[in-house]
Image (cartoon, grey):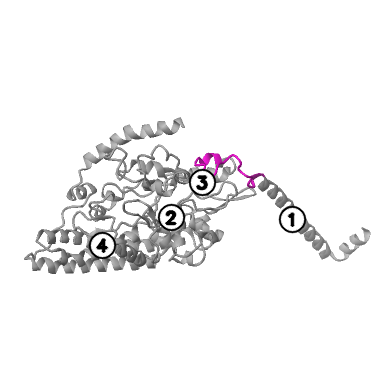
Amino acid sequence: MNSITKLVEEKPWVGWVLFFTTMIVVFVLGLFAASIVERRTEALYTYRPATDISEWEPDSSKWGKYFPREYESYLKTKDMNFRSKYAGNVPIDSLAEDPRLVVLWAGYGFARDYSAPRGHHYAVTDVRNTLRTGAPMTPAEGPQPATCWTCKSPDVPRLMSTMGPAKFYASKWAALGPEVTHAIGCADCHDPKTMSLRISRPALIEAFSRKGKDIGKATHQEMRSLVCAQCHVEYYFQPQTSYLVFPWDSGTTVDDIERYYDSLNFSDWTHALSKAPMLKAQHPDWEVFALGIHAQRGLSCADCHMPYQSEGGVKYTSHHIQSPLKDVSTTCQVCHRESKEELMRNVFERQDKNFAIRIEAEDALVKAHFAAKKAWESGASNDEMAPVLKLIRHAQWRLDFAIAGHGSSFHAPLEVARILSTAVAKAQEARIHLTRILAAHGFNSEIEVPDISTKEKAQQVIGLDMPKLHEDKKKFLETVVPKWDAEAASR
């Protein structure tokens, strides 16, 4: 020891070396000890086989006993406190914000009621309350097929496991109302025995199979998007059977799906004004996302909408599924180094530009529908109108495909701009044809578009009896729904 003291006295820098060396060793040992404590803490929350959870248990609170952090974050999907520039999770009456949509969907249920989506917590509540379901109640079981429940609840795979998909789809929406009570939850995406991600809806598996792909071979990262693609996609109900089908046989782009529908002569409804055989896009989020830069770089839906969280020594996936703009620090800034303000400005810039093209497409289509109505009234023939109606059909299909999804103008802004631009071009081409048809039948004046400046005015223009629809819905909610809840509570 004396020799060390002497060395330090002769060479003071040796003391500093010893000091810093000791500090480094202590620091490393501290990290090692902290790591051990964290791993032990994690072990307390490591997955244990959920022996008391059945194969299709729809009650997410039972899963929450094993995964309290994930469950607590899942409960936050009931939050309604975020509004970005164009969406969010607050209640938004989309028809009130854009009355043109009422005219575009004339003759279809969406002209009655269309609201921006809230969190998964409200999936069952909102489909019960919308004016598109449940009223008027004729026949007694309700007019809609049970297929309308498919993406709303983990009760659906439970019912399908006993009824079979075909019988489920062929049932009536109201007939299964007492059975569908749990909002979207754990069983929709997870196997209770292994907690692996799984596909619980047959339509996605069937769509992949028809294309010669085995969804069972998907990687974990792919599954982090495919579980979302069970529902956040374009789909249609087969006529007569109401069997749910994803129209991907020709591909998943807007053009591919358009060709698929045309080959079947399928239409969702006939437009009340133009008489065009129309297509209604649902919410093709996965199809649009797949064409964007984030998907091309290997990101999944969960990377941005369900970011990882850390609590103490535990790392877990947030199940508070929401807009990434709500918490940029845990979503965008995991990869991007720009400020929150700049990143949000980048998003809004893309959305603003596509929104401008959207309005141009909507305006052109509104005028086309009214011009087609006038052409029919002027004596136009089916042969004259057929090419025009096809243009209107394709134009509105493209518009709808671009705007029906959540965040499409961010997911793939260039593709959405292309789709909207073709919608404008086709709508304007339809108007040119209609001008010629009208002139041939002696009408050479400008088509007057009625006042559709508000949702109420637009609904009146297309002939909707909204007071009666609201009264019918009120009776449904006051008489039928309580019986559903009482029956569910008695089980």
In the rendered structure, which disc, 1 or 2, sits on the residue that comes first in sequence? 1
Q: Position of residue 108 (x, y in %)?
A: 26, 51
Q: Earlier in the sequence, mark 3 or mark 1?
A: 1
Alpha-carbon span between mark 4 and mark 1: 69 Å
Q: Which callout, 3 or 4, points at the residue further toward the start of the chain?
A: 3
Residue identifier under label 1: 27
Q: Which mark is residue 203?
A: 2
214 left or right, relative to 430? right
**Disc 1 residue crowd, few under 14, some 14–19, many 20+, Cα 10 Å:** few
Mark 3 vs mark 2, foreground winner is 2
Q: Amino acid at mark 4?
A: Arg
What is the number of callouts on the image?
A: 4
How many neighbours does mark 3 have within 10 angstroms: few (below 14), some (14-19), or many (20 or more)? many
Q: What residue would you read off at disc 4?
A: 393
Q: In this figure, which residue is indicated by the disc labeled 3?
A: 187
Q: CA distance from mark 4 to mark 2?
A: 25 Å
Q: Is residue 426 left or right of residue 490?
A: left
Alpha carbons under labels 3 and 4: distance apart = 38 Å
- CB contact under 8 Å: marks 1 and 2: no
- The residue lying toward the viewer, choosing from 16 and 249, is 249
Residue 56 part of the magenta segment = yes
Q: Which mark is nearer the camera, 1 or 2?
A: 2
Tell me which label, 4 or 1, sits earlier in the chain: 1
